[in-house]
Image (cartoon, grey):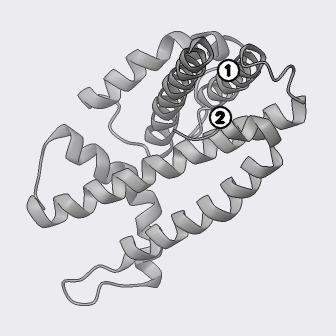
Amino acid sequence: MGSQLGSAGLLLVNTLINIYIFLLMLRFLLQASRADYYNPISQSVVKVTQPAVRPFQSFLGPVMGRFDLATLATAFVIKAVAIIVILQIAGFGMAPIAGVAIGSVAAIANAILKIYFFALIVMIILSWVAPQASHPGALLVMQLVEPIMAPVRKVIPPLGMIDLSPIVVFIAISLIDGIVVGSLTRAAGIAGALVGL
């Protein structure tokens, strides 16, 4: 019973860490897509993640261009430490450093793909239900997915009223998730068990 409670507790901790990694990567992607910084949702994401990111900003510097290296580094370190601590507590001993690093990269890639996956679903629903929505959440979703949708739209123009680009992006996300994240998760060994939500 005690060991079951312990493993449930570790699973909960891992899930909470993965949710925080999700928020960090949302911050990273909002910056990369040049989404509205003053949007209340953007502000909330920054507020929640800033305490963890601040120490990394002190030596990696502020955001340069589109890519916020401090946020990426924060996500990597938090996930790596979490993998090491959870595996130690679970009785697996010290995981190989390479496995921890690969597992952390896989977790970051997994979070990015999940964000785009959910954002695309929301975008598709909004395009049916409220195509002219001005809600801060709707605007942010549009700003977030536009950088990945625009290049696809250039190759596959809409057929009348039907935009096929989300389908292509969904397929690409599934392939990247299956091939890249799947390979990284397997390569991470025991650390790979802690990658996804």
- Above or below, 109 against 176 in this view is above
Residue pictured at 80% horizontal, 34% vertical: 101
Residue 73 point in image, percent of width and height: 68, 27
In this picture, residue 110 sits left or right of residue 191: left
Residue 93 point in image, percent of width and height: 85, 19
Disc 1 residue crowd, few under 14, some 14–19, many 20+, Cα 10 Å: many
Name the kind of residue labelled 1 in the image.
Answer: Ala
* SS under mark 1: helix
Q: Which mark is residue 194?
A: 2
Residue 38 point in image, percent of width and height: 29, 28
Q: Quadrant of the N terminus?
A: top right
- Above or below, 24 against 167 in this view is above
- Above or below, 55 against 38 in this view is above
In this picture, residue 138 sits left or right of residue 184: left
Q: Which of the two labelled residues, at mark 2 and mark 1, occupies the earlier sequence position? A: 1
* SS under mark 2: helix
Q: Are marks 2 and 1 in contact (CB under 8 Å)?
A: yes
Name the kind of residue labelled 2 in the image.
Answer: Leu
Residue 7 point in image, percent of width and height: 60, 21
Mark 1 — residue? Answer: 82
In this picture, residue 122 sits left or right of residue 134: right
Q: Nearer the viewer, residue 154 or 166?
A: 166
Residue pictured at 41% horizontal, 66% vertical: 149
